[in-house]
Image (tube, rainbow, N blue to C red):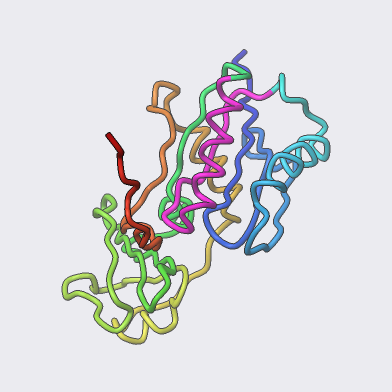
Amino acid sequence: MAKVPLILAFDTSAAHCAAAVVSGDTVLAEMYEPMTKGQAERLVPMLQDCLLMAGAGWDQLTALGVGIGPGNFTGTRIAVSTARGIALARRIPARGVSSFDAMAFGLQTPLLVSIDARQDRVYLRRYANEGDPPFICALDDLPDGISGEGLAVCGDFSWEIAQKLGATVVSRSVSLSVAIARIASARPSDQKRPAPLYLRPADAAPARDLPPVILP
């Protein structure tokens, strides 16, 4: 009899720390804490607490699911690097799941998923038969061709976007971390290592200091 996968999933791509332990269709434990900073210090203790709530140990995990964004650059790197480290130490696969796929999980298509990209911009991805490539645009300058009959919108600024497109608003079917776990559980184990999904350059400005002078 096949062993039921035990998945630990987590996400720090936005202003939160979120984790879940899922076995098959059963959510054994789930934690969510809003935070704008401190994810690096909080994430691993939260994962330990989540496993404790689930009555499971690190050695029982069959795979990890990790949110790869798009979202906060530093937060996304924290989660991805943590997943890679645990996967290497425990010798289990780590499967990256985009925030788009996690938010679209269990919802009907056609669907438009929206994620706050800051500075009055949004990350968008449209799902019809298959997901279109994601992109970034200004909230007030939505491109033509993304609306359509029966379109629903989920995510950040969904009400504003739905009004502009004549669409309806829907909510996620499950939490982000649970969706990541369930998607990761269904994906093949030979996936590439998780990597952050970046759709724009970092907000960091180039250094203003002059480069050092090399003396002869």
Residue 201 rendering spot, x and y as whole percentages: 32, 57
Q: Residue furthest front?
A: 216
Count of all numbered marks drawn on residues in the image: 0
Q: Residue at x 44, y 35 (%)?
A: 194
Q: Residue at x 50, y 49 (%)?
A: 76
Residue 70 belongs to the span the image colors magenta: yes
Residue 36 versus residue 91 in the image, above or below = below
**Quarter of the N terminus within the rendering:** top right
Residue 190 versus residue 11 in the image, above or below = above
Q: Residue at x 56, y 20 (%)?
A: 88
Q: Residue furthest top?
A: 1
Residue 126 rendering spot, x and y as whole percentages: 29, 61
Q: Residue at x 31, y 63 (%)?
A: 110
Residue 14 rendering spot, x and y as whole percentages: 54, 60
| Residue situated in front as seen by the camera: 111 or 49 | 49
| Residue situated in front as seen by the camera: 77 or 138 | 77
Residue 13 rendering spot, x and y as whole percentages: 52, 54
Residue 188 belongs to the span the image colors magenta: no
| Residue situated in front as seen by the camera: 183 or 94 | 94
Left or right of residue 40, residue 185 in this image? left
Instruction: Name which quarter of the figure residue 175 lies in.
Output: bottom right
In magenta, the rendered stretch is 61-88
**Quarter of the C terminus within the rendering:** top left
